[in-house]
């Protein structure tokens, strides 16, 4: 979970010293040359009304329409990595660019027009690798065009490859990072809904937590019976259970049951209009595309797959009225002052527009700025 640590740097050397002294090595990085209201993908920072006027399947329409225009020029490899391909060529997607290179992130925090840099500071956002889950294979396996869904949460609701997609995402949650904060966030959002099966799962969840407190004093046989009963109830709520689930993952299974009921209820027209529901806290999902075009290779780039879900608060058949977006919060924030000087220092060690982008247009831009 986010540590919310904040630092300020004024030079390249100061930045390197900060990373060294604070041991900021097991992180992904994102650089922005000004302060924005939130960290968001190009798709989900757009006006909600403009997105929703295209219906619940607005993302599928965007991806599929783009594919239909260029399909004859797309290789099989590019098709298998089509969301990354689309992001690279400027299509609005739910992917957020990040990097494994702190120097590349620093470049993006400093690169911009003189007018922009004189008005604002740059920012570098760090995401703890241990608080993320790699879903690269799941994206490649499930999100090829022409498809009817490129949305993980929609797949979860409709049971399309539910076990395959979400088993990996949450199976190791208890051991990898704080599961309980995800659980508490989900419980908070469930409590806002009315007339929902999620409330029944929530009651069971709370009862189970009380039971767990007493299981320490149970005999081994009693614990086995308790877990078997729990598994039966979990399966009744639509979450598939296979033999390789360990007993310590029972909480995760209950969490998935509760999450599923919450999302299904949210997509039904049974909640109050004034209800201020948010997407519960979720882990950052990482997409490492094997589609290594020059830019992403030079930038040591990868993506955060930002979750979202469209729903309606009225049953009028007119389409969605609301859109939930996953809140992407960094674990560490570094404010960057003196951007122009740092940009010159980065250029001295070869981190510049020519290197980061590598295409003809940006090489020309770099040469022009160097001589004029």
Image (cartoon, rainbow, N blue to C red):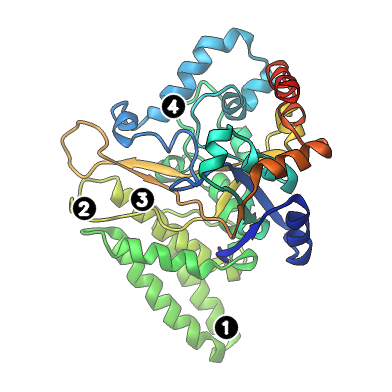
Quadrant housing residue 202:
bottom left
> Badge 3 is on which residue?
263
Quadrant in the picture for residue 156:
top left
Residue situated in front as seen by the camera: 216 or 94: 94
Image coordinates of residue 274 in percent, x first then y, are 18, 54
- Residue name at image x 58 percent, y 32 percent: 113
- In three-dimensional space, the C-alpha distance between marks 2 and 4, rounded to whole angstroms, equals 26 Å
Q: Residue furthest left?
A: 316
Residue visible at 43% across and 48% down in the picture: 37
Check disc 3 and report its element: helix, strand or loop. helix
Q: Nearer the viewer, mark 1 or mark 4?
A: 4
Residue 271, labelled with which disc?
Answer: 2
* Precedes in sequence: disc 3 or disc 2: 3
Q: Residue 49's spot in the image, x, y percent?
A: 29, 33
Q: Secondary structure at mark 1?
A: helix
**What's the CA distance linking mark 1 and mark 2?**
43 Å
**Left or right position of 91 against 10:** left
N-terminal-most mark, 1 or 4: 4
Spatial separation of the CA atoms under disc 1 and disc 4? 50 Å
Total labels drawn: 4
Residue 356 position within the rendered picture, expressed as x and y whole percent measured from the top left: 73, 32
Q: Is 309 left or right of 224, judged from the image as shown?
A: left
Is residue 15 found left or right of 201 in the rendered image?
A: right
Mark sitting on residue 277: none
First of labels 1, 3 by sequence position: 1
Residue annotated with mark 4: 60
C-alpha gap between disc 1 and disc 3: 36 Å
Residue at 25%, 46% in the rendered image: 268
Please give the label number shown on residue 221.
Answer: 1
Asked whether 117 or 31 is in front, the reply is 117
Residue 54 visible at all: yes
| Inter-mark Cα distance, 3 to 4 | 19 Å
């Amino acid at each position: 979970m986010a540590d919310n640590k904040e630092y300020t740097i004024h030079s390249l050397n100061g930045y390197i010293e900060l990373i060294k002294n604070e041991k900021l090595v097991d992180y992904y990085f994102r650089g922005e040359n000004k302060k924005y209201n939130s960290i968001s993908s190009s798709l989900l920072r757009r006006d909600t009304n403009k997105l929703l006027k295209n219906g619940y399947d607005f993302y599928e329409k965007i991806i599929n329409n783009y594919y239909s225009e260029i399909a004859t020029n797309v290789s099989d490899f590019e098709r298998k990595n089509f969301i990354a391909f689309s992001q690279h060529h400027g299509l609005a997607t739910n992917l957020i660019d990040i990097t494994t290179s702190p120097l590349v992130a620093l470049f993006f925090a400093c690169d911009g027009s003189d007018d922009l840099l004189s008005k604002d500071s740059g920012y570098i956002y760090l995401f703890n690798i241990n608080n993320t889950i790699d879903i690269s294979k799941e994206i490649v396996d499930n999100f090829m065009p022409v498809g009817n869904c490129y949305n993980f949460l929609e797949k979860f609701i409709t049971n399309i490859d539910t076990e395959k997609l979400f088993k990996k995402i949450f199976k190791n949650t208890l051991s990898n990072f704080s599961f309980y904060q995800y659980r508490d966030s989900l419980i908070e959002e469930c409590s806002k809904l009315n007339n929902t099966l999620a409330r029944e799962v929530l009651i069971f969840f709370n009862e189970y937590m009380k039971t767990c407190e007493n299981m320490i004093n149970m005999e081994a046989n009693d614990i086995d019976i308790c877990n078997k009963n729990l598994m039966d109830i979990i399966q009744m709520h639509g979450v598939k259970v296979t033999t390789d689930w360990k007993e310590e993952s029972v909480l995760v299974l209950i969490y998935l049951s509760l999450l599923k009921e919450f999302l299904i209820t949210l997509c039904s027209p049974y909640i109050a209009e004034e209800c201020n529901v948010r997407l519960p806290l979720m882990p950052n999902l990482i997409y490492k595309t094997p589609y290594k075009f020059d830019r992403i290779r030079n930038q040591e780039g990868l993506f955060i797959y930002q979750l979202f879900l469209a729903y309606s608060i009225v049953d009028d058949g007119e389409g969605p009225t609301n859109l939930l977006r996953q809140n992407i919060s960094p674990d560490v924030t570094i404010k960057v002052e003196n951007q122009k000087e740092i940009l010159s220092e980065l250029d001295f060690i070869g981190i510049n527009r020519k290197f980061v982008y590598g295409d003809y247009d940006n090489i020309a831009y770099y040469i022009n700025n160097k001589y004029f």
